[in-house]
Image (tube, rainbow, N blue to C red):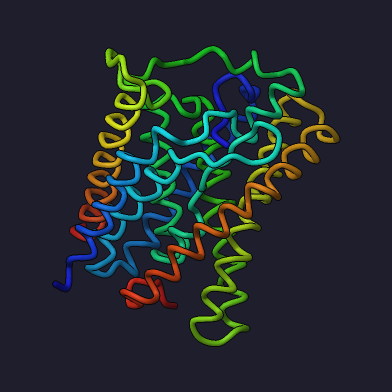
Amino acid sequence: MKKSWIIIGLFISLLLVLFISPFASSSPDGLERIAEDKGFLEKGEGHIITSPIPDYVWPGIEDEGVATSMAGVFGTLITFGLGLGIGSILKRR
Amino acid sequence: MHIPDGFLSPGVWSGLWVVSIAILGFCLRKVKAVLQDKMIPLMGVAAAFIFAVQMLNFPVAGATSGHLLGGVLAAILLGPYGGAIVIAIVLIIQCLIFQDGGLTALGANIFNMSFIGAMGGYLVYHTIRRAVKGDRGILVGASFAAWFSVVATSSICAVELALSGTSPLKIALPAMAGIHVLIGIGETIITVFVIGTVLKMRPDLIYKK
């Protein structure tokens, strides 16, 4: 039981992206809003790299809610793995 | 508040890349010295949770949204250096896999949200925690630090935009700080809720120093 918080924490994170992220606000965030209002939004439209899952939407899935949930689950798991991995490496060295 | 490619001038983004690598190197060395076994999975869970909650944009005034930055939340659990590393992990994944925040601006985003947000926010939290005793100190510290971290991060972001010649400081600073005064309230609500829950369930997971 002592380590159950790890599973619970990860489980809550996955529930949030699975069921809530499709309903998140799609309005621009603070910085985007100001970029739009102050007329410099177009400066940020180019990209140096093309990411595999741009804008948290899994490519090739028609239902945008499902595509967002899938992107979220993938991102949550990979972030968990990277955090755990870096922690483990730091401990071992 | 993830800055995309194109907003920052080469001088500003390359300088902040150098500064951020130096800060992260410093943090990694510092964390090694205080790393306890339970902090290893906590780095994973905190990174995953903050990634997840950052996807949950909430509406604020005038067709604008905000989301958790999580720097103070991470630092209360893992200390300022561990917290900064966790936020950097989230930012790197968001940039490389989800095109959220530009690759050139990644150094600036790490500087803003890890260094100013997590480490700067922790300083505020730590100061209040020393002045107010017990769990109340943790919660009061968390609430002020969370709000402060968002406003401070957005102000630094405005300074970077001004230095880059993207938007003059007298326009960018009041606009960025103004909207993030509101977004910061969301940061406080989420941070206090999560830290309050951790205090009830597993108070040993709160970083102590």
Query: Of B97 and A14, which appears nearest the observer?
Result: A14
Please tell me whether residue A58 is drawn above or below residue B132 in the rendered image: above
Would you say B107 lies left or right of B93 here?
right
Q: Quadrant of the C terminus of chain B?
A: bottom left
Task: Return the x and y of residue B104 as percentages of the image width and height.
Answer: 51, 25
Is residue B188 shown above or below B160?
Answer: below
B174 and A21: which is toward the camera: A21
In-front residue for pair B200/B99: B200
Which residue is found at the position 61% from the left and 22% from the top? B10
Given the current orientation, which residue lies at the most extreme right position?
A: B170
Q: Check the image and name the residue furthest to the bottom.
A: B133
Residue B49 picture location, percent across and down = 35, 50
User: Residue at point 31% right, 24% down?
Assistant: A67
x, y (%) of residue A85?
Answer: 22, 48
Q: Position of residue B124 (x, y in %)?
A: 62, 67
Q: Is residue B98 left or right of residue A43?
A: left
Above or below, B119 relative to B176: below
Q: Is residue A24 left or right of residue B164?
A: left
Q: B184 or B129, which lies in front?
A: B184
What is the count of numbered marks? 0
Q: Residue at x 77, y 37 (%)?
A: B175
Q: Residue at x 39, y 37 (%)?
A: A21
Q: Quadrant of residue B64?
A: top right
Q: Quadrant of the N terminus of chain B?
A: top right
**Quadrant of res A39:** top right
